[in-house]
Amino acid sequence: AGVVIAPLPGPLGLPVTVIGLMMVLRGSFRAKREFVRLQNRHPKFVRPLRRLLRRDPEIIPFVWQQMLRVERLVLPRRFRFFVKTRKKMKGRRRTPD
């Protein structure tokens, strides 16, 4: 269902895909084996998915990192909004008392 929903506007395909993958990986030894093979062949593509499959996934840092990656792939340097935002927020961090 996640693959069918993915082309629609909005991020609805990702959560459905992750939940479906979790269910398949828990119940099928063959699917686990194929997932490990895929992970060994293409670790850069599987790593974000593995972060979401953890017991307590950190969703907000994951989404932020994916937005930065997509921005880097799509936009030239002068139009990168999220990188500039990150640099501004990094300078605003408070120092511990």
Image (tube, rainbow, N blue to C red):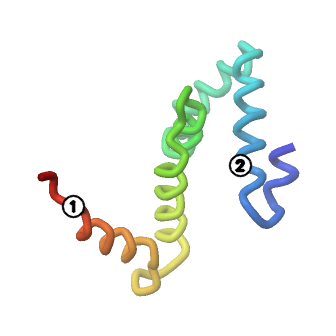
Which residue, as the protein is rendered here, is positioned at the far front?
Answer: 97
Instruction: Please name the residue shown 51% across and 70% down the image.
Output: 71
Instruction: Give the residue number, with chain letter if any, for mark 1.
Output: 94
Frontmost residue, 31 versus 56: 56
Q: Position of residue 69 (x, y in %)?
A: 49, 62
Does residue 26 appear left or right of residue 89 in this picture? Answer: right
14 with respect to 68 (left or right): right
Q: Which residue is mark 2?
A: 14
- Nearest to the eye among marks 2 and 1: give it: 1
The vertical placement of 63 against 17, above or below, is below
Q: Which mark is residue 75?
A: none
- In the rendered image of this protein, does residue 65 appear above or below residue 27? below
Cβ atoms under marks 2 and 1 closer than 8 Å: no
At horizontal 75% and vertical 42% (from top left) the residue drawn is 17
Q: Position of residue 42 (x, y in %)?
A: 54, 40
**Cα distance between the residues tagged 2 and 1:** 34 Å
Q: Amino acid at mark 2?
A: Leu
Q: Amino acid at mark 1?
A: Arg
Sequence-first tag of 2 and 1: 2
Q: Residue at x 59, y 25 (%)?
A: 36
Q: Is residue 60 left or right of residue 13?
A: left
Image side of residue 62 versus residue 5, left or right: left
Compared to residue 36, the image places residue 3 above or below, namely below
Q: Residues within 10 Å of mark 1 (few under 14, many from 20)?
A: few
Q: Estimate the x, y position of residue 74 in percent, counting from the top left.
A: 55, 74
Kindly state the secondary structure of the residue where label 2 is placed. helix
Q: Residue at x 70, y 28 (%)?
A: 22
